[in-house]
Image (cartoon, helix red, strand yellow):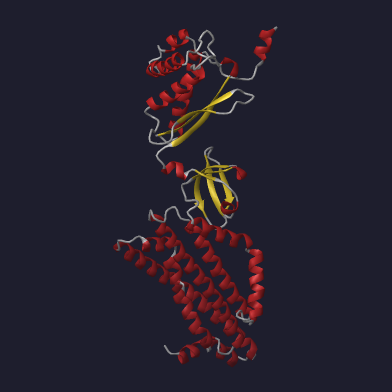
Amino acid sequence: MNSETIQHYSCLLQDYLMNEGMADQWAIFMNVVLNCIIVLVAVFILDIILRKIIIEAFKAFSNKTKTTFDDYLVKSNFPRFVAHLFPLSIIWYLLPIIFVESPFVTNLLQIAAQIYLIVLCIYIFRSILRTTRNFLEENERYKDKPIESYVQVMMIFAWGIGIFWTVQLLTGFSVVSLTTLGAASAVILLIFKDTILGFVASIQVSVNDIVRIGDWITFSKFGADGYVTEINLATVRVQNFDNTFTTIPTYSLIADSFQNWRGMQESDGRRIKRSIFIKQSSIKFLSFEDLERLKKIQLIKPYLEHRQKEVNKFNEKNEIDKELLINGRNQTNLGVFRYYADALLNENSAINKDLFLMVRHLAPTDKGIPIEIFCYSKDKNWVNYEHIQADIFDHLLAAIPYFDLEIFELPTGKDFHDLK
């Protein structure tokens, strides 16, 4: 059917009404209304038919392919949006023919069709972006990357371009003039300041590998302590260990300081660093009787015998008067306890001996002398790590009285009551 035939049929009602004596303007108006109804109904029916055909054909095609990309295209409604292009092209072709007697209506409907085309193209573009995001998230290489941030940025640009073209269609002003672009840039910078900062931050986070999805981070400023579940353009979502969620501005990841536990999780051990505070007045030199008693502790017996031989040899060589223990060289109960703690860690199969291990004596404080345990557990699981750490300190706290040492702690109400 050519354009002349279509135009002839579209004017039948108009010619009929004019022959019946109706005024030309009313005849044209009634003809336009009827043509609009016919076109809309026809296009609506055609859209339904084509949409079902295209969607089913696309599903059949995707089921035969090995890649999952086309499956994600179906899920993102890509075939549905593409199907709308065919009825739109038919409308675009019929408008000048059917409404040849009404150029104003033709121009108005063409503008509406162009705006609809712009929106439709944006939705098609969004479907492709979502499909690409879902497809890449299947790949382990991209699973922990902030792909959502880039998708959101590209969608912002797509909507921005769509809005500019829509404004040009409605107003006739060109969006390529320097003045328009300058004003638009100022508006964009003002409105999308946080978005732009988030986009820059997302790039830096990805390029510098600062945070990945699945990382355990601690961000005291925002009360976050848990695993990163989502990284998008504006925020980073963290699921805390109490199952609450905390959202952190993406830009804060590069502007503020936070703790990422990924290094620990990828290393060969998790650090144990905790101190026991010893009451200073309980520290003493060890007498012969004390040494004989401590030699019953199997873990340090070889050390005590070897060490005491060195001490006795030095004192005899230098003719040291040992009537007072302070003279010459002597062993202390705190020093022996430090060696015992060190030997205990080296005997513990849960401690990684290939990493740094130390029991050290810190500077005295008003709460006693800190004896710090510094080592690494092989098991990095939080629950198991806490059990390993607790077992070590349970044992050391229970062992301290055997060395005639005392733990420092502030007096309680019971202590004051016992003084009465």
In the image, is residue 227 above or below residue 186?
Answer: above
Please give the name of the residue rendered at 41% of the width and 24% of the height, measured from the top-left corner. 343
Q: Which of 100 and 244 is in front in this view?
A: 244
Question: For this view, does 411 lie left or right of residue 49?
Answer: right
Q: Answer yes or no: is residue 280 visible.
A: yes
So how many labels did they put on this image? 0
* Rendered location of residue 378, percent (x, y): 39, 34
Q: Quadrant of residue 224?
A: top right
* Rendered location of residue 86, percent (x, y): 44, 76
Q: Which residue lies furthest to the right in this view?
A: 420
Please give the name of the residue rendered at 38% of the width and 69% of the height, measured from the top-left corner. 53
In the image, is residue 76 above or below residue 404?
Answer: below
Please give the name of the residue rendered at 46% of the width and 69% of the height, measured from the top-left corner. 81
Q: Which of 369 and 30 is in front in this view?
A: 369
In the image, is residue 364 above or below residue 380?
Answer: above
Q: Answer yes or no: is residue 30 visible.
A: no
Q: In which quarter of the image is residue 233?
A: bottom right
